[in-house]
Amino acid sequence: MSDEEKRWPFDGFYLKLVEAQREYEQEQHIDPASLTEEERQQKLQEILDCIKAARKKKKEADEQLDPIVPEEEPETAGATPQPAKQYITDLVGEDYKNWHGIVVFDAGTNSGKTYFILKTLLPWAYEHRKRILILCNREALRNQIERDVNRLGSIEVSYEDYDPALGGIVNKPAIDNKYEHTICVETYQWLETFLQRNEDAAKTYLRSFDYIVSDEYHYMVTDASFNDHVDASYEAIKELWTTKTCIFMSATARPFFDYWKLRKMIPEGQHYRLPMDYRFVSSVKFFYRDDDERDIIRRVQPGEKILVFVNTIAKLRKLRDTLKAEGIEDVACLCSKYRQEAEEFDKLDDVLVGNVLQHQVTLTTTTLYNGVDMKDRALKYIVSELWNPLVNAQILGRKRPLDEGDTCAVYLLHYPKERLEGELKKIEKYQLEPVEAYRKWFDDRKAWKTYLHQPETVEILKKSHTVVLDPREGEYCWRKRATLQARVERVFLLQMLEQGYQTELLKKIDESLLAKVERLEPPPLLEYLDDHLNEERYYQDWQKIFFELGHIYNKADGHAEKSLPSYTCARQWLQHYGYDLGSKQKRFEAGQKKMVWWVTKSEN
């Protein structure tokens, strides 16, 4: 039977919606007789109106990325095969035909998770008149998947139309998407907005699907600190665990997956796990200072590219200005388009085109740490200032190697004990202590009011992501996913303090990275100094050497034209690397007294 012959009106979408409405009424213990047919039809129309409005909004912002599912199979898609590569499709086999409840794809990037959904599950769902909803964490990824669906479902059809030239009805060819009513692709944020506007309609809509695919599920932890509505989508999906097939996909959602496994919530045989593949990482090096980071960027050769993840907007701006002041012009900067500062930086379409970076140096906040892929052989360096291993695992996953020769060096910022302790104190004070206060006093209105009126409480709640003011209710609410994020981060920090930051960070990302650790290359100036130790020179000569080879300058200059470094400034820099700077007045043959400097090196 042909694709055209098998089709039925909307592939049963409206019938599915009617069934979902009845299911939702039963779960909410609503007496069917309490609703007239007109009221029930009105509720269905509200759902359809919400979906239509959302579709119109999505088309307004479409970012172009390469397809996830290429024209060729993943092993041959423009790349040389990598040996012993295993994909999710290999693990699943025919299991998907009997799934029900929770299904987990605990696998790294480039393991074929989405490929399986679109190339195996989708055709099968189409044949069996089942429906799939894919939820993802970024608009760019949603657009990417939706374009794949349109391409994979493309079929030639014909329709009858009146042709005035012929004076009769003729068949005209057209291109249709056979999967249009089999699969929908949305974002978690879209679902959260839907739930806010009409919770009953949103939950009914969810029940019209047989499969709920939660892609990039780490979103429920990593985005909880800045997205106030993560709990809404989490709870709505959770309600479907026992009645639908709910597929959860992520490389870094272990806090959920391990808990579900411990509580035996995952049906036997429905937990699929593939280790991360970091063969493309040529080396891992830790850097310690801003000077080290800038030196890493300066070493990038023509034809090579570097991707740098910074931890604040202020650092993004400062690093950009510093590099441009030094004459490095091919620099792009990116932050979330939802931040008010976004206008002063570049847009994603200007930074990444066809999965290829458009600039030699790309500076970005965590906005680029997931949801996009980079298939760029010139990307030879990835730098991260972030300490969180879940975030760093996603950062490394942005690089999609084209073959075995497509490698990349990774540079991670070292966090000393004092800084880790500072991060830990912030989490405990601003995230976890408010939760304890909320659980202890919120139901006692008098006690809660007393807590709110304490001088320190106002400042704490301004910085809290776990207990926040709900503008709709006018009351504080407890955000459980943000609390989970804080607790997970607290455990990470405690383990790093106990076991050592560098070792624990790499173990949490993937233990294979421990064998790739190398010492950071010293600044070029140090090699010059080793050849010219104890040489007394006129101090201005040394100043020029420090400035040109070591990029040492007076910090007070800000981002204006840099001046030569003072004695104190130069000496501090040298002492950090185990050198020292001597200074004295020396009388030359002409009888003139001049200041001379010389460099020594510690024996330790």
Image: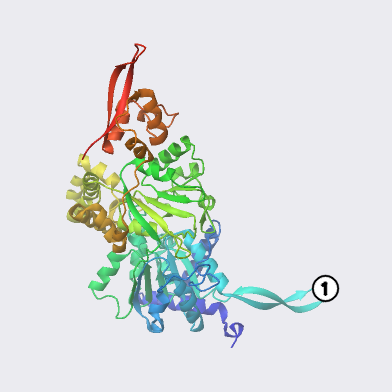
Which quarter of the image is occupied by the C terminus?
top left
In front here: 146 or 383?
383
Return the residue nearer the eye: 153 or 210: 153
- The residue lying toward the viewer, choosing from 241 and 372, is 372
Residue drawn at x 34%, y 35% is: 529
Residue drawn at the location 79% of the way across and 78% of the way down: 168
Q: Is residue 384 above or below residue 24?
A: above
Disc 1 crowd rating (10 Å Cα; few below 14, some 14-19, many 20+) is few
Residue matched to label 1: 165
State the image quarter where residue 551 is shown.
Answer: top left
Q: Is residue 139 left or right of residue 494?
A: right
Rendering coords of residue 207 (x, y %)? 41, 74
Image location (x, y in percent) of residue 122: 48, 77
Residue 234: image location, x then y, percent: 34, 65
- Residue 558 visible to the viewer: no
Left or right for 161, reference 310? right
Quadrant assignment for the N terminus: bottom right
Farthest residue to the top: give it.
591
In the image, what residue occupies the spot 46% across and 69% down?
Answer: 43
User: What x and y, as percent, mark residue 575?
Assistant: 26, 35
User: Please, what secondary structure does the residue beneath circle 1 have?
Assistant: loop
Q: Which residue is at a point 51% across and 40% down the rendered structure image?
A: 329
Is 107 left, or right, of 14 in this rendering?
A: left
Quarter residue 196 falls in: bottom left
